[in-house]
Amino acid sequence: MNTDWSFILGCQIGDGMIACVHRNGMLELLAIPDTGDFSGETEFLTSRKIDATNISMRTFGTFMPLRALMLMTDGVADDYFPNDPQMKRLYADLVLNQIINIQYPGDEAVKSKLESTNLKSVDDVANADFCVEVERITEANPRPTVKLRSAEKFAELLGIDVNELAAQPELLCAGSRAENLLGGDDTPEKRLEVWLDSYQVRGSFDDRTLAVLFPVEKL
């Protein structure tokens, strides 16, 4: 992941999703969740019934400059459905909440991008409210609250589509450079833990597991 080009080869069993965001902002899904006659049915790769054709249908590869590779259970994937294009919103949420770190492209680049949006300057972004205050899900009562930055709300304030936001690191950096809102240890790992335990989607009830790989980019 720390080179200019990355080769990813994956073969999935079960549900969830594997997704990557390319350097040009394009989304690529690298998995097809298992389906069967029963809910949660999975045919393992070591099963005697599985054949080469079945394995090849589950295997996906890509060779591109990447911004991020994300692997998740259905507890996250279902909250960002349909996965194409909602995995872009997931990526933008992770950047805005300082879980995925991308290299700052410079003041002039950020200024230039903002001038074409409804938030014309970094001061406008700083004064904009695109956060949601929510309770930690698994904490004991009284549950503490935490503020999360929302890519959907930020894109709306900018006057652009959230998929366009995900493809523009200058705008993502403008929205993510304020203080850490999630508290705790100042590491992406800790911020991811707090974020997974806090974001709320109606009907979301399953376990949440998310692994993220990303390079330190040179824009």
Image (cartoon, rainbow, N blue to C red):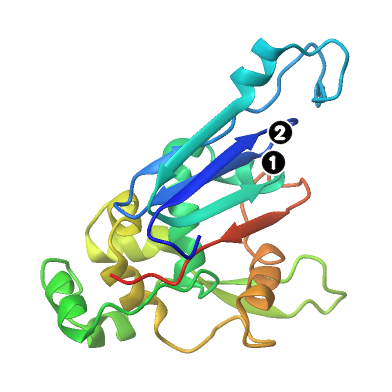
Is residue 16 depicted above or below 140 in this figure? Answer: above
Residue 125 seen in the current view: yes
| Residue occupying the point 59% across, 42% down | 18
In the picture provided, is 25 more to the left or to the right than 89? left
Q: Residues within 10 Å of mark 2 (few under 14, many from 20)?
A: many
Q: Which residue is mark 2?
A: 15
Mark number displayed over residue 175? none
Evaluate if marks 2 and 1 touch, with contact meaning CB atoms under 8 Å apart: yes
In the picture provided, is 151 more to the left or to the right than 159? right
Q: Nearer the viewer, residue 217 or 107?
A: 217
Q: Secondary structure at mark 2?
A: loop
| Residue occupying the point 35% across, 66% down | 154
Task: For the C terminus, give its image quadrant.
Answer: bottom left
Is residue 123 depicted above or below 136 in this figure? Answer: below
Query: Residue 114, image x and y in percent?
Result: 18, 73
Query: Residue 21, image x and y in percent?
Result: 42, 50
Query: Residue 82, image x and y in percent?
Result: 50, 35
Q: Which residue is mark 1?
A: 74
- Determine which quarter of the picture holds residue 122: bottom left
